[in-house]
Amino acid sequence: AQRVTQPEKLLSVFKGAPVELKCNYSYSGSPELFWYVQYSRQRLQLLLRHISRESIKGFTADLNKGETSFHLKKPFAQEEDSAMYYCALNEGYNTDKLIFGTGTRLQVFP
Amino acid sequence: DTAVSQTPKYLVTQMGNDKSIKCEQNLGHDTMYWYKQDSKKFLKIMFSYNNKELIINETVPNRFSPKSPDKAHLNLHINSLELGDSAVYFCASRLGGPLLNTEAFFGQGTRLTVV
């Protein structure tokens, strides 16, 4: 069973439009959730983690335990945001198993 | 001073061959992973090691054998390569442990093409 679901494979928006990349998870314990990003020809890197409750490059993500979601949002997309975005869940306790969703490609057009 | 380095970056080989991909991290992390990224960019965990011990084996064919000679290295050996093994393989490391919310650092990937 897929533990991390990203329903959209591709999301295309114009510059300045709001962006929401969806992520739902399935985990009975206390989840550790992350968003990773892979820009073209670069290695996968951490964008943000839920525990930090931070805004990175204008992106935020709120953990909603009721809806088991961790959607990534940005109010005004920029062309340089075009990349592959992965939601990740660490099943954590005593296993340290970092599971990724299938990824969403964000394309921001000028 | 790359944190996680993989070699080679590209690997083209024939079906049936045996090949290895090396991974080294200089971050002092306890946990290392191998992931496979298919043509659709799906990133799937294969193995996880913690302090040289195998923690996770995600039903990977036994043609794939990870080896961790020490905490800083996790190599991936693949026997009898098949066409379906063609993918990008990523190594990653992380300061492991429960509920640490720590960042995973990835290598640049090894693009394996089996012909």
Image: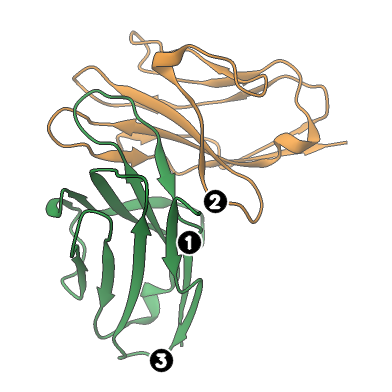
Chain colours: A orange, B green
Ranked by sequence position, the earlier of labels 1 and 3 is 3
Label 1 marks which chain's residue?
B
Which kind of residue does numbered mark 1 sit on?
Gly
Q: Nearer the viewer, mark 2 or mark 3?
A: 2
Q: Position of residue B71 (x, y in %)?
A: 21, 53
Question: Which residue matches tag 2?
Answer: A43
Task: Report if the CB atoms under discs 1 and 3 are less than 8 Å apart.
Answer: no
State the CA–CA distance, disc 1 to disc 3.
20 Å
Dot label at residue B109? 1
Which residue does the numbered mark 3 point to in the structure image?
A: B14
Secondary structure, mark 1, is loop
Q: Do the residues at pointers 2 and 3 share their chain?
A: no
In the displayed structure, does residue B21 sit left or right of residue B55?
A: right
Residue A59: x %, y % from top left: 62, 20
Mark 2 touching mark 1, by CB under 8 A? yes
Compute the Cα span from label 2 to label 3: 27 Å
Which SS class for mark 3? loop
Of B77 and A14, nearer the camera is B77
Residue A110, picture quadrant = top right
Residue neighbourhood size for the residue with mark 1, other residues' Cα within 10 Å, grouped as few (<14), some (14–19), many (≥20): many
Q: Quadrant of residue A30?
A: top left
Amino acid on which disc 3 is placed: Gln
Q: Is residue B65 left or right of residue A25?
A: left
- Tell me the residue at 71%/40% (across/down): A82
Instruction: Relative to A73, say whether B53 is above or below.
Output: below
Q: Is residue A5 left or right of residue B100?
A: right
Find residue A1 and report its horizontal and vertical position in percent. Answer: 25, 40
